[in-house]
Image: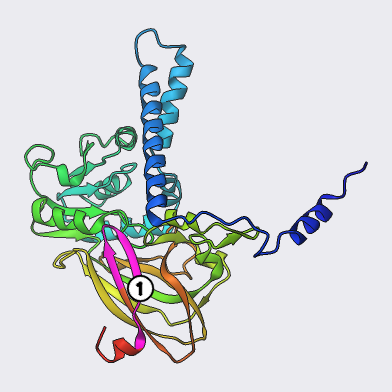
Amino acid sequence: MNSPPVDRLAEEDLGKRPDNAERAPGRPVSEQDVNEALATAAIRVALDQAGESVATARTLLPGARARAEVTDALLGAAIRSVPRWHFAMLNDLERNDAFAVALERVVPRGAHVLDIGSGTGLLAMMAVKAGAGAVTTCEVNPVLAAVAEQIIAAHGLSDRIAVVPKLSTDLVVGVDLPRRADVVVSEIVDCGLVGEGVLPTVRHAREHLLEPGGVLLPESAVLYGALLDSQAVDGLNRVQSAAGLDVRLLNALATRGHFPVRLPTWPHRLLSASTEIAGFDFATGALTDEEVVVDFEVTESGTAHGLAVWFELRLGGGIALRNAPDNLASHWMQAFVPFAEPVGHAAGARLRIVFSWTGGRLSARQLDFVRAAEGIS
């Protein structure tokens, strides 16, 4: 007997499964059930990763297998330890030129420069070209620190640049660097500015590693944002159903806070004008976790799924970098900060948002407008 076509089977099957009566009742799942399941799974992941690390380490023991296999295992571990965005970052001509020019304009001749986050050592070498007498550059990833040392040596700059495989917050003046730096340069920002820890890092550096009156590069930054209507972007981090089945429990694994999105590649509408959200003065600002209340005027009716956020990074010497949606040359994407639930708004409304940055994470929640307007929020 011939089987019916797959598409007819699907239609017949769907016709036998109405959304209500004939479905087997599901078991109620509590938040505690989900959290316990995730905790167990996370432990398994950690054990698997530890096992993989042990297996790689064993390749270094006497009597290990053929040299080629050892090399492949070690190279694989090294590759996995380095985020892929380093390649896009180094190919960002606008970023590279901006830092080169800014360093030329702000580094005093013969200065001692501290570069936080070596990567490949690019900014450290730029500082030398700009006139620095000596540079200390730190990098916590040992693989990148080793790469930076080799690149610096290949340029004949090992006598001017010292690579320290540490976090900047672990540096000790007189041990890891000869004295406090005259200039501190860093580029530890993500699409939403704060995700790589720039605020606590700069705060520590200016208090413990920078000479009084020294130069910070970048010198300041501003966050901008707009209300975003985009079911496609929202769907990158939120789900309801798939093939008629409820899969919302996956939302327990949704990204908390912001995540990167190349806005022009997705269908979207901005429901408000670009609005300044927060400013950061790296020399004198608190640079702590905070929240602010920002009003957005809805210029076009639609559903606000969250905020599209970008930054302007003011390096110094009149040079700035932006990752606004219209800057397609930047390797930085924009940040999407989702609301807990999408909400529809009419043109002309004013939306009050509580915007916060905590632990390198951007968050936003909508206040009830009437209560906010009455001052009861």
Q: Which residue appears at 22% of the width and 59% of the height?
A: 199
Q: Residue 262's x, y, as percent?
A: 50, 62
Q: Is residue 224 left or right of residue 27?
A: left
- In this rendering, position of residue 41 left or right of residue 176: right
State which quarter of the image contains the C terminus: bottom left
- Residue 334 picture quarter: bottom left
Colouring of the image: rainbow
Q: Is residue 266 left or right of residue 188?
A: right
Residue 359 image offset from top left, x and y in percent: 26, 57
Q: For this rendering, which residue is in front, 75 or 122?
A: 75
Q: Position of residue 294 (x, y in %)?
A: 31, 80
Q: Is residue 365 magenta?
A: yes
Magenta stretch mostly in which secondary structure?
strand
Q: Residue furthest top?
A: 63
Task: Please state the extent of the stretch shown in magenta in the rendering.
Answer: 355-369
Q: Give the amino acid type for the residue marked by disc 1 in the picture.
A: Arg
Q: Which residue is mark 1?
A: 365
Residue drawn at point x = 45 percent, y = 92 percent: 348
Element marked by disc 1: strand
Instruction: Please rate how many residues cluster around mark 1, counting C-alpha atoms within 10 Å: few if below 14, some from 14 to 19, many from 20.
Output: some
The reply to whether the magenta stretch includes residue 374 is no
* 43 in relation to 299, above or below: above
